[in-house]
Image: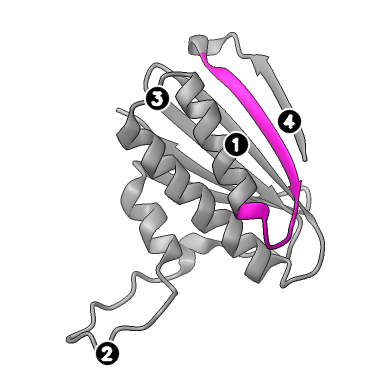
Amino acid sequence: MIIESDRMGRENFQRHDLTLASGPQASGDASEWARAVAEGEGLSEDRIYALDTCVVELVTNIVDHSYGGSGGDIRLQLDLGEGVAVLKLFDRGPAFDPLSVPTPAKPNSIEEAKVGGLGIHLVRSMSDRCEYERHDGENVFTVYLGP
């Protein structure tokens, strides 16, 4: 795990970076890091909860689907300032736009409900905006949380 921090001049944001290996503990490590950084920067508990949920869901998707259990690095970049969080995740798996996944249909009963498949929907629901791009062989997914 590689952790970096530096000061961004623009709008008084603090940038934090984490690089970790894809694997079973990646989402837990990313969650612990994001919570500690966000708490240290004074983000509200509601924003920390939303940030943590997004981190866990997105890192889990990268581990399970992008790298499919094989090795690879996941890079997270978190900019925090003035109650705002901007989270970027980078991976070198096959190109895939998570925003192309349609919103799941609401089941008519508990018996019809499926387990899983709600991660991207949760991220969209908890964030103010999401963006996806493919750049230099990397998937780049950005989540905006803020006023």
Picture disc at residue 43:
3
Please rate how many residues cluster around mark 2, counting C-alpha atoms within 10 Å: few if below 14, some from 14 to 19, many from 20: few
Q: Amino acid at mark 4?
A: Ile
Q: Is residue 12 left or right of residue 95?
A: left
Q: Is residue 72 above or below residue 88?
A: below
Element carrying mark 3: loop
The range drawn in magenta is 13-27
Q: Which labelled disc corresponds to residue 3?
A: 4
Task: Look at mark 1 in the image and give the residue it sits on.
Answer: 33
Report, in whole angstroms, how far the alpha carbon at label 4 lies from the one at label 1: 9 Å
Q: Nearer the viewer, residue 44 or 85?
A: 44
Task: State the residue at coordinates (37%, 58%).
Answer: 122
Q: Does the residue at mark 3 contact the one at mark 4 (Cβ under 8 Å)?
A: no
Q: CA distance from mark 3 to mark 1?
A: 14 Å
**Which residue is identified by label 2?**
112
- Judged from this view, the residue extending furthest toward the left is 108
* Chain-order first, disc 2 or disc 3: 3
Labels 4 & 1 near each other (Cβ < 8 A): yes
Looking at the picture, which amino acid does disc 1 mark?
Trp
Residue 4 lies in the magenta stretch: no
Which one is earlier in the sequence, the residue at label 2 or at label 4? 4
Q: Residue at x 64, y 70 (%)?
A: 65
Q: Residue furthest right?
A: 71
Q: Earlier in the sequence, mark 3 or mark 1?
A: 1
Disc 2 or 1, which lies upstream in sequence? 1
The residues bearing labels 2 and 1 have C-alpha atoms spaced at a distance of: 36 Å
